[in-house]
Amino acid sequence: MLEWLFEPLSFEFMRNALMVGILAGVLCPVVGTYLLVQRMALLGDVMAHSVLPGLAIAFFLQINILIGAFVSGIISAFLIAWIRSQTRIKVDAAMALIFSSFFALGVLLITLLRNKLDLDSFLFGDILGVTQADVSRTAMITLVVLALVRLFYKELFFYTFDRLGAQAIGLPINSIYLGLMAGVTLTIIASMQTVGVVLVVALLVGPATTAYLLVKQLHQMMGLGALLGAVSSVIGMYISYYLNVPSGPCIVLISCGFFVLAVLFSPSQGLLTQPETVNRAANILSRLKQTERSK
């Protein structure tokens, strides 16, 4: 058992992959909790795909591609907010428009600029190719975002649950929105090598949704979601190592497995633990026993 547990740790690429996976597993649910509570979970998917044009341009200009990704993500968030506030278009339509437009622009730029950008690793992740520098960068992003969330927790809490009330007492809701979107973009950048932009929304929302079924307070959702995200990353990495399958999908599927368990067995909202469900099952069993006795 111990040999099975420690064998992957003898390889440097696995140690780096596990550290990045744990960091992303902690960071994504903390930020994703705000999107989930605001019913804007798909915004994470929009932001993930919107970074592609920035990646393509930064790669062509030979500057840090993460800078390009961050700028592109912030521009997409600003455009969604502008369309939402200045037109009659609803937020879901604005997100769909920006999502498709930015992704198409990114693919077009990669072709026109003749970039040798590895789309497969960008879309689906390449966690086994991370280096010590990637680990340091992910750790720095994680610490910065978590520190800012802790510092502005009260403002984010008020904005999340009562945007109009936050505006009425003078909070800069536009700045809070852009700050939150900056956090989402940085989280996506930190998680790109772990699961890729196609699956990053599952890591953003999956553990947070599971925690939502198990606890009631926002800070509890963040803590439990971070724990579930980290555990999902570790289990997914070990499955990936021993079965020789892609790590990103394994991490996401483990996270979804936790969600299914929560849906079934949550103490307060589980399908199999709700009092009416238990009583209904007991009544059915009682009727079956009575029927058998009558025969």
Image (cartoon, rainbow, N blue to C red):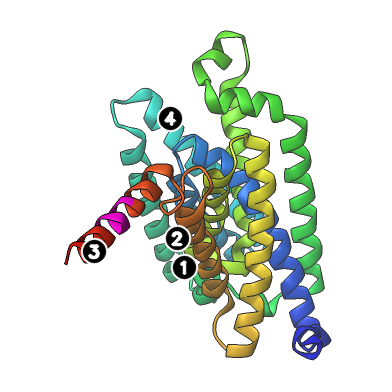
User: Vertically, is 91 above or below 237?
Assistant: above
**What's the amino acid at mark 3?**
Arg
Label 3 to label 4, Cα distance in Å?
Answer: 69 Å
State which quarter of the image contains the C terminus. bottom left
Residue most extreme to the top: 169
Please indicate, yes or no, whether residue 41 appears anywhere in the rendered image.
yes
Near mark 2 (Cα within 10 A), the count class, few <14, some 14-19 or many ≥20, is many
User: Vertically, is 277 above or below 19?
Assistant: above
**What's the amino acid at mark 1?**
Ile
Q: Nearer the viewer, mark 3 or mark 4?
A: 3
Q: Earlier in the sequence, mark 3 or mark 4?
A: 4
Q: Nearer the viewer, residue 96 or 160?
A: 160
Near mark 4 (Cα within 10 A), the count class, few <14, some 14-19 or many ≥20, is few
Query: Do residues under tags 2 and 3 come within 8 Å of each other at their CB atoms?
Result: no
**What's the amino acid at mark 4?**
Trp
Residue at screen point 52% across, 46% down: 213
In this image, 100 relative to 143: left or right?
left
Near mark 3 (Cα within 10 A), the count class, few <14, some 14-19 or many ≥20, is few
State which quarter of the image contains the N terminus. bottom right
Residue that numbered label 1 is attached to: 110
Label 4 to label 1, Cα distance in Å?
Answer: 27 Å
Name which quarter of the figure residue 221 lies in.
top right
Label 2 to label 3, Cα distance in Å?
Answer: 70 Å
Residue that numbered label 2 is attached to: 106
Query: Do residues under tags 1 and 2 come within 8 Å of each other at their CB atoms?
Result: yes
